[in-house]
Amino acid sequence: MTAENLEVPQESENTNPEESFDLNFLNYISSLGLQAMIFLGELPHPVTNKTEKNTDQAKLLIDTLSLLKEKTTGNLTDEEKNLLEGMLYELQIKYVEAVKQGRIIV
């Protein structure tokens, strides 16, 4: 999962933001992945537009995605399964790279 691959639903000017977001499994796991990327410092924080790191929160989100993968095995569409597995793989790689670079103390 790279910043280029993340698709964040766009709000239209005339709708309530709460109404424009279609809550489904794909959007939910995408949202968790996006948050994890922000907490790993891979993407700027959407409010401050600054790169920030919160590795404890990143790890929590990665572990949450892993738990979702485990608990939903056999119940996902191919698209959901592929997104979840791909996202989890990318996040785990980025987390390991951060540990190796000394950005994260385990």
Image: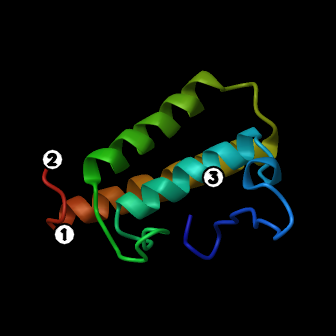
Q: Amino acid at mark 1?
A: Gln
Label 2 sits on a secondary structure element that is: loop
Q: Amino acid at mark 2?
A: Val
Residue at figure coordinates x 41%, y 37% from the top left: 63
Q: Badge 2 local density, few (<14 within 10 Å), some, or many (20+)?
A: few
Label 2 belongs to which residue? Answer: 106
Please state the horizontal and vertical placement of residue 39, each as a whole percent of the image: 37, 58
Label 2 to label 1: alpha-carbon separation = 12 Å
Label 1 belongs to which residue? Answer: 101
Foreground mark, 2 or 3, reads: 3
Do the residues under discs 2 and 1 have CB atoms within 8 angstroms?
Answer: no
Left or right, 13 with respect to 6, comes to right
Residue at figure coordinates x 30%, y 57% from the top left: 96
Question: Is 103 located above or below residue 54 in the figure?
Answer: below
Label 1 sits on a secondary structure element that is: loop
Please state the horizontal and vertical placement of residue 91, each as a whole percent of the image: 45, 56
Do the residues under discs 1 and 3 have CB atoms within 8 angstroms?
Answer: no
Do the residues under discs 2 and 3 have CB atoms within 8 angstroms?
Answer: no
Residue at figure coordinates x 57%, y 31% from the top left: 68
Label 3 belongs to which residue? Answer: 30
For marks 1 and 3, the one nearer the N-term is 3
In this view, the residue in front, 94 or 11, is 11
Please state the horizontal and vertical placement of residue 61, each as a whole percent of the image: 43, 43
Label 3 sits on a secondary structure element that is: helix
Foreground mark, 1 or 3, reads: 3
In this view, the residue in front, 70 or 5, is 5
Q: Amino acid at mark 3?
A: Ser
Question: Is 33 located above or below residue 68 in the figure?
Answer: below
Question: Is 40 located above or below residue 78 in the figure?
Answer: below
